[in-house]
Amino acid sequence: MFKMIQKRDGREVPFAESKITDAIFKAAMAVGGEDRQTAMELTIEVLKLLKKQYNGNLFGVEDVQDLVEKVLIEAGHARTAKAYILHRDRRTRMRDAKGELMDAVEEILEETNRENANISNSPSAKMLQIASAASKKYYLTRLIPEEMSLAHQRGDLHIHDLDFYGKTLTCLQIPLFKLLSEGFNTGHGYLRPPKRPTSATALAAIILQSSQNDMHGGQSFAFFDRDIAHFVEDASDFETYQAMEALIYNLNSMHSRAGAQVPFSSLNVGTETSEPARRVVKNLLLAYEAGLGHGENPIFPNIIFRVKDGINYNPGEPNYDLFKLALKVAGRRLNPTFSFMDSSFNKEYGDQVSYMGCRTRVMANRRGPEVTDGRGNLSFTTINLPRVAIMSERDFADFYRRLAVILRLAIRQLHHRYGVQCKLKVKDMPFIMGQKLYLGSEELRPRDPIEEAIKHGTLSVGFIGLAEALTALTGHHHGQSEESQSLGLEIVAFMRQQLDEASAEYDLNYTLLATPAEGLSGRFVNLDRKEFGLIPGVTNKEYYTNAFHIPVNFPVSSFDKILLEAPYHKYCNAGHISYVEMPSPPMHNLEAVETIIRHMHDHDMGYGGINYPVDFCVGCNLTGVFNEDNCPRCGSANIRRVRRITGYLSTTERFNDSKLAELQDRITHK
């Protein structure tokens, strides 16, 4: 009867009525039917309608499917019709995903996606991101429950590192001394324990690189000074300095993840008082201060200096000189940042709390020892706080109802992901699990599932845009109004309570994260602007403000910013950080740096640092703050501009558009 049919891509192909029969029969079988004769009879009814409606003219695949649905419903086959419609919808979403994937590949081939400022534009990076795009589409359409997948696509929440959803974990605090003292295998042979400092730091760099290849987040040494001290006991300052310089050089040049990026590395130091440990910290800081080969500012490692009363906070304490040196280096190189062991939520653990540069913190543990070494975050999902506020239309009761619903969805989504992660085997993470880096992996064999280890990790719900949410709810953010500040603290306390209840319900370590939003800050606001339009103070910028931070363009003193942000740290047990912006490297005003860091310490912050611009001319090696496009000394346009982004340092050409917009809006704090 019919010769040709038009495909969705415009091609005309021979018409086959058997395909209609097959589709109806499969839908019937899906709901318990097995009568192919009925499917053939229904096909005849579809053909009659096609002849009547198109009278010999060309029709398309969608036209046929519309008529199949009509015939099934009118013939009383409601259950078969529903199965057919669901199958059709699923196939449509798969086709759409494939089309979107091809668009993404085309874009990546031109330039890599800048969601992550540590990823280059190299061929390896392009290949990795093409695989990432395909992986995301697979998980959203095939693995993640539809309710959760749609919430991510709408922008109600954001599943971080979606491309690694079922492949691995986020991050780890690595037990460095265990590996160096026992030796380890990266898959190509055993590396024996080192004997000298340079060998120890060379292996430390390899450990960070190998760990990053097994995970999608950052890698950190929780006690770098303590763990390396064993290998510098009889070393001179010169030899120790050479070892630390080599480590910094390696961590800014050696690549992982198929050559796409250098390791996201963090080193926690500062509270070990033995002479070898002090020598490690002193020379690490001096090597970092010296910079790279031409004096460039190192990007990695992120050095985190632990501050603790009785050890290094006051004159006369054993490591006070190291604290002063850390302040000096921070005044020139942006690092170290500072973690505060005396804060109300860290103090109970002594000096054992470690952070990562991205702000991640892992400490309390429902399922085992409360330690940092050998543990990390398993995965995290961020809720779109401004969207919840916009939709509640200033009805506070409705806001909390909506917030509770989206928090529960995020909690269930993390539990779904945890279930997928638990089924991974030791051999799937050959270095992290195979070399027994993760707490609880010691007795596991290559084909054992990893649940016994990862039960010690954390599942984190994060949030973004408290400032914009408060503006949507009250007309003012928490820097503008005491009432908004009170409401902000109430909202974050509510979220923490929900996560604590989830921990008890699931007997897992659910925690609240002050999200380090990078690509996400622009993604959420773009989706919300399309749906809700331009809302002053909410959707009229290219980004949402990170977590609980005061908006970057709001004029506030450094002391007031600290006072406003400090109370949020105690609620965000998965991680938090606050910064003060300065106009230039304060290397000649270290008193100001110390005053700021002490103000953070004294007002119950957990983790903080100072920000300022650092520009470097590749042509003549001049370092400073260049307000023009060209070097003021040699005129070169080849300027390397280092800034902090989501905790780590990067160069501005790797910032995405939303983060560039935020960077341009940043003002200094007096």
Image: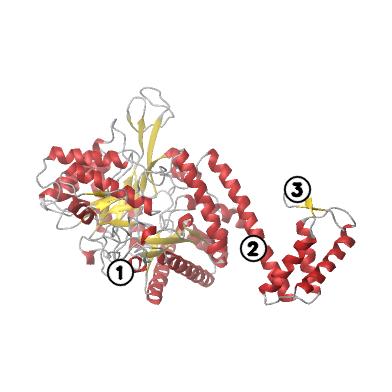
At label 1, the amino acid type is Asn
Gap between marks 3 and 2 measured at Cα: 22 Å
Picture quarter with the C terminus: top left
The residue that mark 3 highlights is 11
The residue that mark 1 highlights is 365
CB contact under 8 Å: marks 3 and 1: no
Gap between marks 3 and 1 measured at Cα: 59 Å
In the image, is 448 to the left or to the right of 291? Answer: right
Q: Residue at x 34, y 50 (%)?
A: 579
Q: Residue at x 40, y 31 (%)?
A: 639
Q: Label 1: state its secondary structure.
A: loop
Gap between marks 1 and 2 measured at Cα: 41 Å
Q: Which mark lies nearer to you, 3 or 2?
A: 3
Q: Label 2: state its secondary structure.
A: helix
Q: Which mark lies nearer to you, 1 or 2?
A: 2
Q: Label 3: state its secondary structure.
A: loop
At label 3, the amino acid type is Arg
Q: Which mark is residue 90?
A: 2
Disc 3 crowd, CA 10 A, few/some/many (<14, 14-19, 20+): few
What is the x, y in percent for residue 660? 47, 42
